[in-house]
Amino acid sequence: MKRAELAVLLVLALGGTAMAQDMSYGEAEFMSSCASCHGIEARGDGPMQEVLRQRPADLTVLARENDGVFPYNRVFSTIDGRFQVPSHGDREMPIWGRHFIEEDTKTFGDKAGEIVTDERIHELTNYIKTLQR
C-alpha cells in the first residue's frame, strides 16, 4: 500500500476532524482519546482524573524526566499497550492499540487496519512530543 493511500485511510479513520478543525491528526486523536484524563494541555488534570486511582501522567515533562530526550518508543508502546508484559502489573490507562485495531480492522481489513492503527499511534506520539516544555 502506498503512503498516499495510508494518508487517505488515516483521514477516514479520524473522521476528517483534524482537517475540519485545522488540527494535526495527532492533536485530534489526543483530544478524542486522551484529554479527558490527561487534560487539554496534557498536564494530567483532565476532568476524569478525580475518578481514577492514580493521577494521569503530566505528558509535558516526559523529555525533562528523561535527560532532555523525548522517550518516543516508550510513549508509543505505552499508548499501544498491546505488547506490554502482564506481569508488570495492571494499568488503569486503556490499551489504545487494542481499541484502535478493533475499530480499524472493521473499517479497513486486517492488514490495512494494522497500518492505520500504527499510524494513529505514531501521530499521537508525535503530537505529545510537541507538548514538551
Image (cartoon, helix red, strand yellow):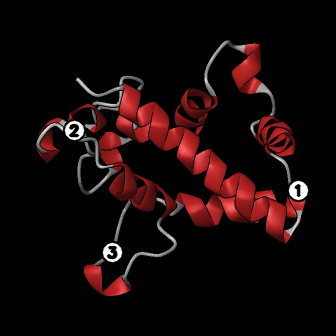
Could you say which disc has been placed on residue 63 in the image? 2
Q: Residue at x 13, y 43 (%)?
A: 65
- Distance between the alpha carbons at the discs numbered 1 and 3: 30 Å
Q: Residues within 10 Å of mark 2 (few under 14, many from 20)?
A: some
- Give the image location of residue 111, x and y in percent: 81, 68
In the figure, is residue 41 to the left or right of 133? right
Q: Residues within 10 Å of mark 1 (few under 14, many from 20)?
A: some
Q: Residue at x 15, y 46 (%)?
A: 66
Q: Which structural element holds mark 3?
A: loop
Q: Which residue is mark 1?
A: 107
- Give the image location of residue 14, x and y in percent: 74, 37
Query: Which amino acid does the dot numbered 2 rest on?
Result: Ala
- Distance between the alpha carbons at the discs numbered 2 and 1: 35 Å
Q: Which residue is mark 3?
A: 90
Q: Is residue 97 above or below residue 119?
A: below
Q: Is residue 48 above or below residue 110?
A: above
